[in-house]
Amino acid sequence: MNAEGEVMRRALRPASRAIFILLHAAIILTGAGCGVLGVAAYKIAGPPAVEAKYVPDKTRPMLVLVENYQHQSAGSATSDVLAHYLGRDLQDHQVAPIVPPEKLQSLRDQRGGEFSTMSITSIGQAVGADQVLYVQLQSSDVTPLAGGDAFTGQAAATVKLVDARNGQTLWPTDVSNGYGVSASVRAGAERATTPQDVRRELNLQLTDQISKLFRKWKPDDLSGES
């Protein structure tokens, strides 16, 4: 190689290194840009939606049946209120056509004491439901704190969806007693200053949790009052 060629080669070395550095920086910035764009998209659109645990048949009438045989006398009113909230929420989110609660009450009135011995399937068939959302309220307790000026609440229930035509459990199929949900209202909560407020908040929390089992929802989706 002549002297002129050697000079050109030496002159190109820094340029080549500069081009390499620039390309490497561009790659890094591009990757960082994707991350920045991803964060921006997350902030705009929010977290991804959570899929339903089970999607009921939207063409089949559904009965919402909430019972509490462990505390029948104290729990019947709570069960009815929870059933009302839940039925309306499911109807609003178009999970399934909901059997009017008046039909269930009419059946209770007609059967009297016999009603407590009826199976989930027979109750569903009697009111014209093809599927029954059965909620067994395990507990719903409101406890006063020292001095009685504040209250706390705890509630728990199991949930399952039953085919009223044959008694088969549609969901969950791996847990015989149903899927467990719970709710908790702490003392001093903004909307829970009386025992009635606490009870209402417990029902609203259970409604929200149960409803979301059967529909797609966003983690930042704060359901309104039912």
Image: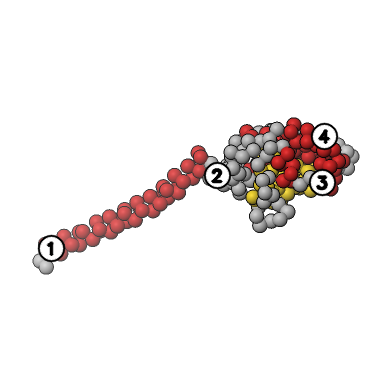
Residue at horizontal 53 percent and vertical 41 percent from the top: 46
Q: Amino acid at mark 2?
A: Ala
Label 3–label 1 contact, CB within 8 A: no
From the image, state whether disc 4 or disc 1 is nearer to you. 4
Q: In the rendered image, which quarter is residue 81 located in? A: top right
Q: Disc 1 designates what residue?
A: 5
Q: Residue 32 at x, y = what percent?
A: 42, 50
Its colouring scheme is secondary structure
Residue at horizontal 78 percent and vertical 36 percent from the top: 107
Q: Disc 4 designates what residue?
A: 109
Q: Is residue 57 above or below residue 3?
A: above
Marks 2 and 4 sit apart, C-alpha to C-alpha, by 42 Å
Residue 49 circle label: 2
Marks 4 and 3 sit apart, C-alpha to C-alpha, by 14 Å
Q: Amino acid at mark 1?
A: Gly
Label 4–label 3 contact, CB within 8 A: no
Residue farthest left in this picture: 2
**Total label count?**
4
Labels 3 and 2: the sequence-earlier one: 2
Marks 3 and 1 sit apart, C-alpha to C-alpha, by 102 Å
Labels 2 and 4: the sequence-earlier one: 2
Q: Amino acid at mark 3?
A: Thr
From the image, state whether disc 2 or disc 4 is nearer to you. 4
Label 3–label 2 contact, CB within 8 A: no
Q: Disc 3 designates what residue?
A: 117
